[in-house]
Image (cartoon, rainbow, N blue to C red):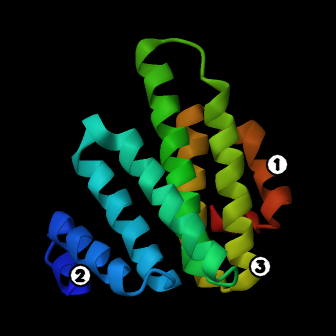
Amino acid sequence: MGLAQEQLGQTKDALAAFLKAEETAPQSEIVQFFLGREYLFLAEFEPDRQEELWQKAEDAFLKSIALDDQYAKAYLGLGSVYMKRSAELLDTAMTSKQAVDPQSLQFAEQGIETYKKVLELNPDPDKLRILIRPLRNWLWEARIAKRAQPCLYREMQIRPGCF
């Protein structure tokens, strides 16, 4: 039911369905993954609750990983949470013309580490492009792309053509 509602763009209803599923299957890494995804989607539509929803998404993805540390999709979701948090802090700094919060870099590093785990678990080159897109966007937004790209290539052992 939750997947159908998600496909229809009914994020709140999908979240309610996955919360109900959690009651019957609290130890399901898949249910936890979908909870994390719905919290992440919902954060896009409720900016006043964004941090709270990101935290719930992070908690759900971490629980999914605790239940099955080989579940690559949970790491992908967790990396997305970290990169969104990093991008939000970066955007805030840029629009307010203040220094970038060091936590933005910490979140980006956490995102890179979780994406590296995805590649370790599932070294599919097509998935690589999906993983690289948020990192590339973050680097461009940070306006440090030329300095940071060689480091990113080295860290993730990426061919320059992927950018």
Label 3 belongs to which residue?
A: 120
Badge 3 element: helix
Badge 2 element: helix
Which label belongs to residue 1? none
Where is residue 8? Give x, y as percent: 13, 77
Residue at 64% in and 54% down: 111
For the residues labelled 1 and 3, the Cα–Cα distance comes to 19 Å
Lateral position of residue 17 relative to residue 59, left or right = left
Q: Furthest-front residue in view?
A: 23
Dot 3 and dot 2 residues touching (CB under 8 Å):
no
Label 1 belongs to which residue?
A: 151
Where is residue 76? Give x, y as percent: 57, 69
Name the foreground residue: 119 vs 159. Answer: 119
Kind of residue sitting beneath label 1: Cys
Residue at 76% in and 37% down: 147
Q: Quadrant of residue 133?
A: bottom right
Would you say residue 30 is visible in this rendering? yes
Kind of residue sitting beneath label 3: Glu
For the residues labelled 1 and 2, the Cα–Cα distance comes to 40 Å
Kind of residue sitting beneath label 2: Gly
For the residues labelled 3 and 2, the Cα–Cα distance comes to 29 Å
Lateral position of residue 55 relative to residue 120, left or right = left
Where is residue 143? Give x, y as percent: 60, 32
Label 2 belongs to which residue?
A: 2
Lateral position of residue 26 relative to residue 8, left or right = right
